[in-house]
Amino acid sequence: MKRVLALVLALCLALSLAACGGGNSTSQPAGGSETGSSAAEAVLTEEITIKFANYALLEDGYTEFWEGVKSGFEAQYPNITIEWVTAPYGEITNQVINMAGGGDMVDMMFGELDWIPTLEDAGLTVPVTSVLTEEYLADFYPSVLESCKVGDEIYGLPMYISPFILYYNKDLFEQAGLDPNTPPTTYDEMLTMAESLSKLTTADGNPVYPFGQTTASVAVSGASLTGMVYNFGGTVLDENGQLATGNQGLKDAFTMLQTLDEKGYNPQNAKLKDLRQLFATGQLAMYYDQSWGFNGVSSINPDAASFTASAPALKGGSGDGASILQGQVLLYMDNGDLQREACRLLTEYMLTEEVLVDYITNITPAYPAKQSMADMELNPVLQGAAGSIDNLSSAPFVAAQADLNLELCTLAQAVTVSDTDVDTAIANFEKTASGMVG
Amino acid sequence: MSTSTAVRQPRLKLKKTTGDQLFSLALIAPTLLVTIVFIIVPVIDSVIKSFTEYKIKNIISGAPGEWNNFENYIKLFEGGKLWPAVIHTLLFVVGVVLAQFVLGMALAVILNSGLKGARFIRSVMMMPWVVPTIISALVWMWIFQPQYGLLKYAVSVITGGAVSDFAILNDPNTALLGVAVAALWKQVPLTTLLLLSGLQNVPDDMLEAATIDGASRAKKFFAIVIPYMKSVISIVVSMAIIENFKQFPLIWTMTGGGPSESTTTLAVLSYREAFVSNNLGSGAAVTTLWMLLMIVVVAVYRKLFQAEDMN
Amino acid sequence: MKEKNIPLSVCKWALLVLILFFLLFPLYWVLVTSFKTNMEAYRATPTFFPDAPTVESYIKLFTENNDFFVYYKNNFIVSGVTALITTCLAILAGYGLSRFHFKWNGIVVAILLSSQMFPVVSRMISLYDLMNKMNLINTLPGLILALTAAMLPFTVMLMSSFFDSVPNAVEEAAYVDGASRLAVLWRIVVPLVKPGMLAVAIYSFLMTWDDYLHCITLIQNDALRTMSAGVAMRYLGELSYDWSLINTISIIGTVPMLLLFFFFQKYMVKGLVAGAVKG
């Protein structure tokens, strides 16, 4: 009997030990009850840890920059430590949400513009005005801040921005007998050029795709497709965030996708990273990407800068080639005054010429979001598309943005890989999307 | 003396049973505790959530979901995604399980036919089984890669260049097949191994007797071997059904449910509802239906098997 | 008995070669690709043996991207400890279920069998919540407990079928000698089921090595991640693909499992077969 009891006890003990072990990895924010004014002083002396959720830390092209930010900032503010919270691109929002659900909220997050509505809807992010001063924000382009708004508040601070631009391969243009310095400006011109480009093959015997538009099911593809709809003067949502799909521009854009697919010009069901890879290996002559996508290209082919040039998005139908803004933004969560102060310091440290310019000029080509940085030298590959930053359409965010973007991908796949006719596919899209919006 | 033993005997017996009971409880308790806490409770909790409006806000505030009159289920049944997902799931499960059984059985029979080096082959062929799922997804994604993939090259050589852009995962008609091939690759070895051991247990004298009676190979196989292996087959197949019903990382890594949702199984749908659309209540509703379907399929399968056993 | 049947044996060989090709060629292909440069891997006409074999990707993996080995180490810890705990618990519970037949056995078995069926996705949301309340999120012990729970149903049933095959008489003799129940289990019965223990331990090691969903949900810190999650995270990023490196990782990630399997396959095979065939 005693032995049995002892065994039971031992097991209970073992289990409870296991249950308690290692539970100390969640660090509590140091002090939380300071008032605003004392926080400004305390932030310089108290031991603070900023929890920074950052998917990019794990991606080859970005790691060095972010590690540099950490060491530089910690050297300047020895009392503040940056603690990374990492997850892959596709999982990090869930991760941040799950953590918050467990009472462990990160202080800051690096992410895409399109993630703002989800996190705002979850009640996680706080307006940037509660972290940064009005004066500081006044330096950012108003139209850019406008794109980060949900309702009347700005919920994300853009670090750098880019519309969807057209990257093209000058060498391939030359080989096809085209002028490498006159990229197409309209979809019709593009189709003509594509005809000669499609006849090329690479030295290894791989075929060359003339034009790439991403359609695989990830949210960013949906954003890219929205951009394409705007190129044709169409809309997906109206300014009140209601579905607005009954327009010619939308139809034209997806008809164009179907045409491209029928001619075999566009790699099917490709993610942006697939397109970057094809472009880097000289198998894709033109494609749409965010400017920083070039980082992915050059990490595969370090010589890519020698043949890459950019151009504004194409004009189609009655549209004027307007694109949508993409940005990599900082999001803030509220863990008390002291933490917010620390986030302010980190933000102000990062978004300076010294720290950021080298990064967005040489590593991740992008356009600055701050007016005071307007004179910075752009990465040479971005020169061609420089004007396109002024031709942006903006649409309001809806809470179901990620879902809506995925539905756009499904629509694109319907008219390409599934061979559905455009009208039917759009009608199906309306049916599903209306359940998500409004 | 005699009275004392008479008194002691029942006490001892009683003590033995209670002792056994306590001992057996103590043996089972830790396992039961871990299983209930980490599996049963979360599953029940998830079923409860499926009847509520439960979104990220609830996670963050810790507020319990609100009862919403089966709205998650109604929306699922009215929306166009549930039925295709059910069909994809069943297609995937039935297809993979059947193919797996046929291939596994063929290989097992061959290995059991007195082949030289059968033992060596048996251990070599187990290799895919130990490859982690994520890696087997990568292996096949690389083979299926639309531009540089081996399969694309092979197809273009076989068709004499007529089909030069075969991309199995990009075509809604073939994508599920592509994932199924990867699933098969990883699962055939274990099936083979178990079936092989079942075959080895079939007594030789029965087969010899049948040979003397002049039974054909096919007849011997279906009349003696298969019935004898019934219990092994039953277990192998139900393991395979469960395994493939649950399959998630493979599909998620290879296709993410696309293209055109042609590989969206219930597993993918529930993950998407819960973690991409952030509607956890709806995701839980999908998993609840998914578990129900699985229970029904397994039950039907067992019933069929038993019914046949009776005959 | 051995009648010669040429067409049949040709068929047999053809089928064997075909199935083995299907099972083994992909592994060869990954191995070959891992020794190619990226540019060679991307040729339209693939080379079946690298033109210029290179260990560049391996060097890159060991030097530049060596976080990989952190995942590796974590995975060994997680899988090893899980296998250990699982085996211990499975011995106890398996013995309990096999030797003592009380009314709750049916319920226990039902709970175990149904637990085996529930998909991981279905409990992830709630499991996260629970782990969090127990302060186990983002810790290896938490991950290990969750994985142990996932392994137990199958392994307990397997273990119990091993105990079924040990004759009762052995224990009864020991009881007569006055040994306690625990002593009987520990000194007499357990040594008899060693192959079963090994099978259970290796099985749980292999299966937890494969885990993806638990780790991706329950672990947030890169320094604590296990391999599948780490690979998905660090090498399948959104920015770009590096197929040579991915193939290299596939090889490095698989080799220890292969070694383990070949080393222990005798027990593994016997154990799984005995368990599954009888269970």
Image (spheres, coloured by chain):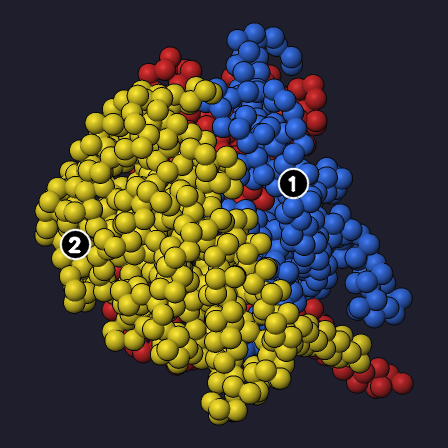
Chain colours: A yellow, B red, C blue
Across and down, in percent, residue C119 comes to 47, 57
**Residue B140, position as x, y percentages in the image:** 49, 35
Up the image or down, A48 lies above or below B89; here it is below
Q: Is residue C16 left or right of residue B265?
A: right
For the point 70% across and 27% down, the residue is B119
Residue A124, placed above or below residue A435: below
* SS under mark 1: helix
Chain letter for the residue marked with disc 2 in the picture: A
Q: Say which mark, if any, is on residue A235.
A: 2
Say what amino acid the circle numbered 2 marks: Thr
> Element under label 2?
loop
C8 and B272: which one is in front? Answer: B272
Question: Residue B99's spot in the image, x, y percent?
Answer: 45, 33
Residue A347 shows in this picture: yes
Query: Residue, x 58% and y 39% (percent of image)?
Result: C245
Quadrant placement of the N terminus of chain C: top right
Number of other residues with Cα within 10 Å of mark 1, as a class: few under 14, some 14 to 19, many 20 or more:
few
Picture quadrant of residue A360: bottom left
Q: How many marks?
A: 2
Labelled disc at residue B280: none
Which residue is label 1 attached to?
C60
Which of B165 and B83 lies nearest the eye of the viewer?
A: B165
* Percent coordinates x, y for residue A273 in the rendering: 42, 43
For this orientation, the residue located farthest to the front is A375
